[in-house]
Image (cartoon, helix red, strand yellow):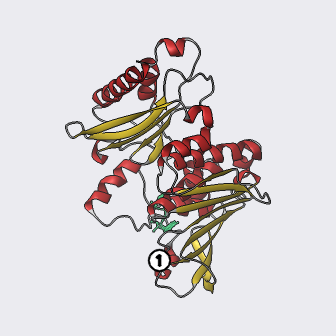
Amino acid sequence: ETVVNKIAAGEIIVGPVNALKEMMENSIDAGASTVDILVRDGGLKVLQVTDNGSGINKNDLPVLCERFTTSKLTAFEDLRSIQTYGFRGEALASISHIARVTVTTKTQDEACAWKVSYAAGKMVGSPKPTAGRDGTVILVEDLFYNVHSRLRSLRSSNEEFAKILDCVGRYAINASHIGFSCKKFGEAQFALAVKATSTTRERIRTVFGRTVAENLVELNIAENSEIGVSGRGQVSNLNFVSKKSGSPVLFINNRLVTCDPLRRVLYQVYGSYLAKGNKPFIFLSLSIRPDLVDVNVHPTKQEVRFLHDEEIIGLVANQLEDALASEDT
Ligand code: ADP
Ligand code: MG
């Protein structure tokens, strides 16, 4: 294993939650309607994502964990989205340089599933036939086993698990029509379970609790082609009283991000509500034309920038203001 590969991998995967985010996104991209997550030791011992998506073609397995191997570069539209996401085909490769990766996958056309392991970007041996349903299981074991400095710098496994659960919950809120579950290895109870048929409000209730879910107003940002934006959201109304609602659940083009200028402006709209020490829950899912989202964002930095930012932020703030006002009468 080369030091260069390990360092490159460590820049993309700084903790178990980064690996999980990439794996969940792959399951969603594969058209899954269920995504089930199993975690042992905060994801350091075991991080497993099981989906019922398209599966991976047997022919693609030999190079699956090689850098820049991606099935997502077919159309021009995809070329633009590479820019959005900054990188493509690096996630599984990176993970395989700092963990043991085992993939079990079955496409509809195959009679059985195929199981194969990877180390340092390369397939180990050849795929073996095995029992399995349509879809993919990606098992990541012993994350950072060869990066001792990173292992030492991580928090306790409970804290890493909390980050994982928070991330799964956020994806579960945004990805309507997809069911999610997350549990700790050896525990019967799910730490989180959301049905594929659940509404957005039910999802918010499961993740953030009843009081948050019962005090929401809906945002609808109609498509504005001039600045290339549309979106939807659910935010606290002014009756909601709480100091701990978490940071905003913000998705841009279905990718979990943060955007400080947008967050600040939205909180400002709450005005005196905020001054009383309350903190609103905010879920916002925006679609922004891919070529208008900043191209230079590093994969681990979740902070995004986009063109027409003042107009877009202004538009969302106006919607929020109207929604809160109409609720207040
Ligand atoms: P990217 O998602 O940018 O293409 P990744 O390294 O995350 O790169 O994944 C590499 C490729 O592996 C994907 O393009 C996809 O073809 C395949 N893949 C990974 N996970 C899954 C999955 N859960 N279901 C189907 N295909 C997958
Ligand atoms: Mg990916």
* Residue type of the residue flagged with mark 1: Asp
Inspect this view and state whether residue 2 appears.
no
123 or 162, which is in the foreground?
A: 162
Which quadrant does the N terminus fall into? bottom right
Inspect this view and state whether residue 318 appears.
yes
- Location of residue 228 (image quadrant): top left
- Location of residue 284 (image quadrant): top left
Name the outermost residue toward the left: 226
Give the answer, above or below, for where 122 lies relative to 230.
below
- In the rendered image, residue 278, in percent from the top left (x then y), is placed at 57, 19
Name the outermost residue toward the front: 329
Residue at left offset 49%, top offset 48%? 199
Is 98 left or right of 262, judged from the image as shown?
right
Is 148 left or right of 233, judged from the image as shown?
right
Residue at left offset 79%, top offset 57%? 187
139 or 184, which is in the foreground?
A: 184
79 or 237, which is in the foreground?
A: 237
- In the rendered image, residue 148, in percent from the top left (x then y), is placed at 74, 51
- Location of residue 328 (image quadrant): top left
- In the rendered image, residue 285, in percent from the top left (x then y), is placed at 41, 41
- In the rendered image, residue 126, in percent from the top left (x then y), is placed at 60, 84
Mark 1 is surrounded, within 10 Å at the Cα level, by few (under 14), some (14 to 19) or many (20 or more) other residues, namely few
Q: Name the residue under label 1.
A: 60
Residue at left offset 73%, top offset 49%? 151
Which quadrant does the C terminus fall into? top left
Q: How many labels does the image show?
A: 1
- Is the CB–ligand 1 distance for label 1 below 8 Å? yes
